[in-house]
Image (cartoon, rainbow, N blue to C red):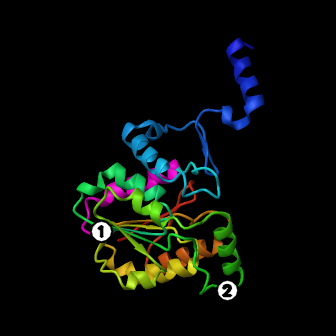
Amino acid sequence: MGMREFRKRVNLFFNGEKALPGFHADNLRVLKKNIGFLDEPRFKEAWEFGRSGNKHAFGKKRDVPDIRWRAHVCCWAASNALSLEGDFVEFGVNGGLVSMTVCEYLNFGKQDRTFWLFDTFAGIPTESLSGEAAEKAKRANDGLYSDVYEIAKRNFSKFENARLVRGTLPETLDASPVGKIAYLSVDLNVAKYERECIERVWDRIVPGAPIVLDDYAFQGHEDQYEMWNEFATAWGHMVLTLPTGQGLIIKH
């Protein structure tokens, strides 16, 4: 055994998987793949913009989660959506980690469209939930969420065409003049809310538009997984399962 190999094995022994090359974060381990997008200057700058703006939005978790691969998926989807007619919409924003990254990546302030950002900005509403769904939402609120509205306002202040809509979905959606949709990101953590929202906007989503489902394939989110599969099948579509845990639908 050469010295180089010896050092690699010692490093692996003391540091475990963190010593291996590749990507290891967000419950995802990737080896022997080309992941140059992580070091692409435009993406790195956009991610850092989102990360730095959310340091206090994740106070209960102490640190901003490394969801760069999920952010990359959304940047890809949003970039393709620029060729389509319609606004951008996100259901479930919190402090805006992903949508900030997308906005910075696309220089969204220069785009001739609106980014509608819907959230309570204070966690998951539990009033209309019952049983396990209510308990799960309460646990998430206690462990993760806090009032981040002022943080979100500051985070998107440089983008005049980003509109924060504060309140409970789908009621706030019903009261907002959202027209055609070219890009949709969904992260409401509750199947009931996500179903109510997609049923309201499905006909507004233009052909070719990407729909990114943040929680789709994560364990513990089986209700959402089953709901989206059922909904997509009913409309002649199929959800692509991504190793990030996201789901992806391309409207046709």
Pointer 1 with pointer 2, Cβ within 8 A: no
Q: Nearer the viewer, residue 229 or 73?
A: 73
Q: Residue at x 38, y 37 (%)?
A: 41
Q: Is residue 2 above or below residue 167?
A: above
Q: Position of residue 191 (x, y in %)?
A: 57, 77
Can see residue 220?
no
Query: Which element type, helix, strand or loop, lies under badge 1?
Result: strand
Instruction: Quarter of the image for the N terminus: give it.
Output: top right
Q: Which residue is mark 2?
A: 130
Residue that sits furthest to the top in the current view? 2
Residue type at mark 1 is Asp
- Residue 103: quadrant of the picture: bottom left
- Residue 113 figure quarter: bottom left
Q: Residue furthest front?
A: 150
Residue 25 is at least partly visible in this image: yes
Q: Of helix, strand and loop, which one carries label 2?
A: loop
C-alpha gap between disc 1 and disc 2: 33 Å
Residue 110 highlighted magenta (yes or no): no
Label 1 vs 2, first from the N-terminus = 1
Quickly name the residue at label 1.
87
Foreground of the two, 109 or 22: 109
In the rendering, at what x and y percent does residue 227 appear? Answer: 56, 78
Prevailing SS of the magenta stretch: helix
